[in-house]
Amino acid sequence: MSSVITVENLSKKYIIGHQKQERYTALRDVLANGAKRLTHKLCHPFAAPEIDSAHEEFWALKNVSFDIQQGDRVGIIGRNGAGKSTLLKILSRITEPTSGRVKIRGRVASLLEVGTGFHPELTGRENIFLNGAILGMSKVEIKNKFDEIVAFAEVERFLDTPVKRYSSGMYVRLAFAVAAHLEPEILIVDEVLAVGDAQFQKKCLGKMEEVSTQGGRTVLFVSHQMGSIMQFCNKALLLAKGEVAQTGSVTHVVNTYMNLSSKNLGGFSVEASSLQKDICIVSAQTYDLEGNPAVNFTHNQEIVIGITCKINRWVNGAEVRISVRDSKRNVFTTDTELVARDGQTPDKFYVKAVIPAGLLRPEEYFFKLAVYLPNQVIFDLVEDALSVTVRDGGSKYAASEGLDYGCVFANCQWVIDTNPIF
């Protein structure tokens, strides 16, 4: 496939101001500073202008480079202030880069923030034709798509009302419908879809997938909802402090992002020499399937728990237990017996448990670990030794992220037939 977007060493600098400490500036200081700047400019006409000490250079993007192929659905993710919106504004030709180069092959339609691209005094009908003209489409082409746009946006009753009277949701519905239906080669969508309701978000994701897979168009999508990113995108780009931290498959990049700033990535550990119990828990950690320490997972990922137990005195029938709770209740408990192999009684045991994918719904979970002899004695107990966060990984409920999914995702057996089943 050919590249439709090529970004090479892209950088964007802003000058940000800071409030000075003094309460006021005297007129003589203003005149003196002005004279100094004028003298400096006359003596050094080709020197770079001096930056006032009350101002600071801020690089929103620094040497960003990447390549996007035709038909790619790319999720751009990162924390607030990482440079996502600045990047999209440069790609949409709204702002100019400080340095670097961008090559774009094809028409670009952007939906960056509520209000962008519409004239508030014009009606919805007039703005549809205005946007189409901006995209380089003829009046006939726009008319052919007009009914589809209006039906998708669900604003028939308000079509001849100035858009300044639209609610934010109506505004976004119409703006997205125009951007998606006027057949641009590249569609750029920022977090603005979060303004819409869950049903409309689902509708938008379906439309973006349709224009990408069926029309071969390229989509750049920014969202903080990782479920939507994983459901829709086939690639991802992670920005951190204005730089590209990682690009690649959406699952790998999202996992990196979710674990990037985790404070509890070190798991649980205690000095073994200080524990004199018969059997004690020395350390525990959660991992992904590749064996990397992780505390953030999507609901369709397996969660691996590794536990190290120190054996000071062997006890037949001892078991290791994991109890999982969320913020409201205990969710489930699982355990296994410590069994000596070949009659050997080692001084350490390494235990691994795997929570199956698709069981835990999006929520924060806490793991209580215990070693005990059933119905007799608890050798060691660690409350909330580990914690993980599970996010929606692209389920059919992704557009409703944040709502109550229930206690767990149940993988029930279903039978559908045209004849009575019982």
Image (spheres, grey):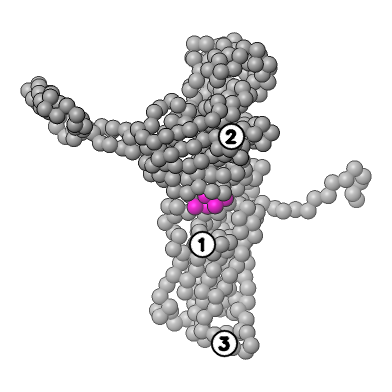
Judged from the image, the secondary structure of the residue bearing numbered disc 1 is loop
Task: Specify the quadrant of the image occupied by residue 179.
Answer: top right
Who's the residue at 36% across and 35% down the image?
99
Whether 320 is drawn above or below 60: the answer is below
Question: Within the image, what quadrant is residue 325 found in?
Answer: bottom right
Q: Is residue 199 visible?
A: no
Q: Residues within 10 Å of mark 2 (few under 14, many from 20)?
A: many
Q: Nearer the viewer, mark 2 or mark 3?
A: 2
Percent coordinates x, y for residue 166 in the rendering: 54, 18
Residue plotted at (49% across, 62% down): 293
**Where residue 120 appears, x then y in whole percent?**
49, 14
Question: Bounds of the magenta span?
Answer: 251-256
Dot 1 corresponds to which residue?
A: 292
Query: Could you tell whether 124 is left or right of 147 in the image?
Result: left
Going from N to C along the chain, the mark reached first, 2 or 3, is 2
Kind of residue indicated by mark 3: Thr
Instruction: Name the residue beneath numbered marker 2.
Output: 218
